[in-house]
Amino acid sequence: MIIRANKGQVSYGESIGIMMLDTFTPFIPGDVGNATTYSFPVRYQRVEGLTFNRLLSKDPAVIDSMLDAGHNLVKEGVRAITGDCGYMGMFQREIAQELNVPVFMSSLLQLPFMSSMIGKDEKIGIICSHSNHFNEDLIDMLGIDIDLSRLRVRGLEDRENFVKAAHDEIGVLDPEVIEGEVVSAASELVQEHPDVKVFLLECSSLPPYSAAVQEATRLPVFDYITMINYVHSTVVQKRYHGFM
């Protein structure tokens, strides 16, 4: 079989491209930004100047930088593109329209699937980075159809150690302490809303704590990594071998 090179591509075998915020935060295993999180190669591309605060400001000028990053990832051969912040979903439609590979910028894209898994009177618990910025506009920008009354949202903007690491970007974090903050937020949400039957951890820094949330709540937990693994399985299908 003849294999031909792609013009401009200098490396091969990276299925998922990940646009990264311009941040100063350590990414531990399980975080979207740590390559050892995955059982397959990924490729990272920093979006220059795209800080978390600038993203939350909904600055429309950032779309050009994001598209440049996306085009670079496509040129290097990735088969699908995601991001490292759920609020990147504000630009889901524009990026998906521009790039010629599947685009899934926010973990929130899993919400319709999750909603179909539970009863009509049951709820989805969402732990997000900053609840003040979780609103109907964000859902509309994602282009998904979800009844907001089915969501129970708890932000981490009042959790001191998470805020220092993820929002203030002090450059250090204590995973055990932050895990406790995330678990307490999830446990409080379930206590206040017993109808919550499944969780979504919105922030790309939260997957390291998904197992602990599940152990505390005994509920299914979706996060950024469940989404990335799922999309990877669709763009890199494998043949099955066994016996009958």
Image (tube, rainbow, N blue to C red):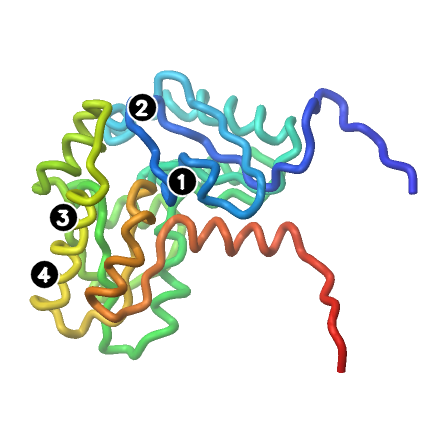
- Residue at the disc numbered 1: 32
Q: Which residue is mark 4?
A: 188
Asked if the residue at tag 3 contacts the one at tag 1, i.e. Cβ–Cβ closer than 8 Å, the answer is no
Q: Earlier in the sequence, mark 4 or mark 3?
A: 3
Mark positioned earlier in the residue sequence (1 or 3): 1
Question: CA–CA distance between discs 4 and 1?
Answer: 25 Å
Distance, label 4 to label 2, CA atoms, is 30 Å
Q: What amino acid is labelled 3 in the image?
A: Glu
> Given this view, does label 4 or label 3 mark the residue nearer the observer?
3
87 relative position to 186: left or right: right
Disc 4 marks a residue whose amino acid type is: Glu
- Amino acid beneath label 1: Val
Quarter of the view holding residue 27: top left
Give the amino acid at mark 2: Thr
Q: Nearer the viewer, residue 104 or 244?
A: 244
The CA span between labels 4 and 3 is 11 Å
Q: Nearer the viewer, residue 2 or 193?
A: 2
188 relative to 140 in the view: left or right: left
Residue 65 vertical placement versus 145 (above, below):
above
Q: Disc 3 on helix, strand or loop?
A: helix
Tag of residue 23? 2
Give the image location of residue 228, x and y in percent.
Answer: 48, 49
Which residue is disc 3 drawn over?
A: 181
Point out the tag, 4 or 1, that comes first from the N-terminus: 1
